[in-house]
Amino acid sequence: MIQLTREQLHALIAHARDCAPNEACGIIGGKEHRALKIYPLKNTHATPRVNFYADPYELLAAFRDIEANGWEHIAIYHSHPASEAYPSATDLAQAYYPDVTYLIISLAHPEQPIVRAFRIVAGQVTEISVMLTKDE
């Protein structure tokens, strides 16, 4: 399970929409599966419509902030601008962090975005729940 506030969920969807038709990407810092801060990152991949690669300098800054706050890296997120919210073959091949949640935001139906969460371990996909908590 991963816990997000409605505001955080809306921020993820807004980032995905802002980046469309390219994929959005970022990480989430928090504690005990509870999101405390979203770090939208620039997608620097050569083919950003179908792949993502987080800007390494922005990613390093995000990891440093997470560490400075005593948090954990709890999730990686990215969008699928034109396909379902399910890990692609590329997503599976690049799932290097078995302890984090992978969030995928689908904009296949732009007026009804879908956000789903997964654990990916050794190529095996397990869907986990996204729990909405009260905004603080």
Image (spheres, rainbow, N blue to C red):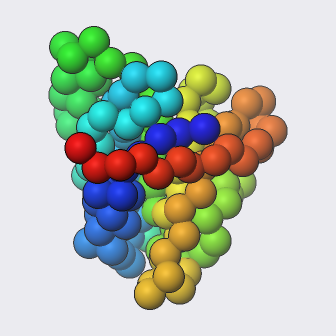
Q: Residue at x 27, y 22 (%)?
A: 66
> Is the residue 104 above or below the residue 69 in the image?
below
Left or right of 122? Residue 24 is: left
Q: Quadrant of the C terminus?
A: top left
User: Residue 2: horizontal and vertical position, in percent?
Assistant: 53, 39
Left or right of 65? Residue 124 is: right
> Is the residue 99 above or below the residue 47 in the image?
above
Q: Is residue 21 visible?
A: yes
Q: Is residue 52 visible?
A: no
Quarter residue 36 falls in: top left
Left or right of 130? Residue 64 is: left
Give whichever of 105, 4 is nearer the camera.
4
Q: Quadrant of the N terminus?
A: top right
User: Residue 130: horizontal and vertical position, in percent?
Assistant: 56, 49
> Is the residue 49 above or below the residue 64 in the image?
below
Quarter residue 126 falls in: top right
User: Residue 5: horizontal and vertical position, in percent?
Assistant: 36, 50
Q: Residue at x 32, y 18 (%)?
A: 71
Left or right of 31? Residue 36 is: left
Determine the residue located farthest toward the right in the rendered image: 124
Q: Residue at x 35, y 49 (%)?
A: 134
Give whichever of 33, 88 is nearer the camera.
33
Q: Residue at x 38, y 78 (%)?
A: 21
User: Residue 82: horizontal and vertical position, in percent?
Assistant: 54, 79
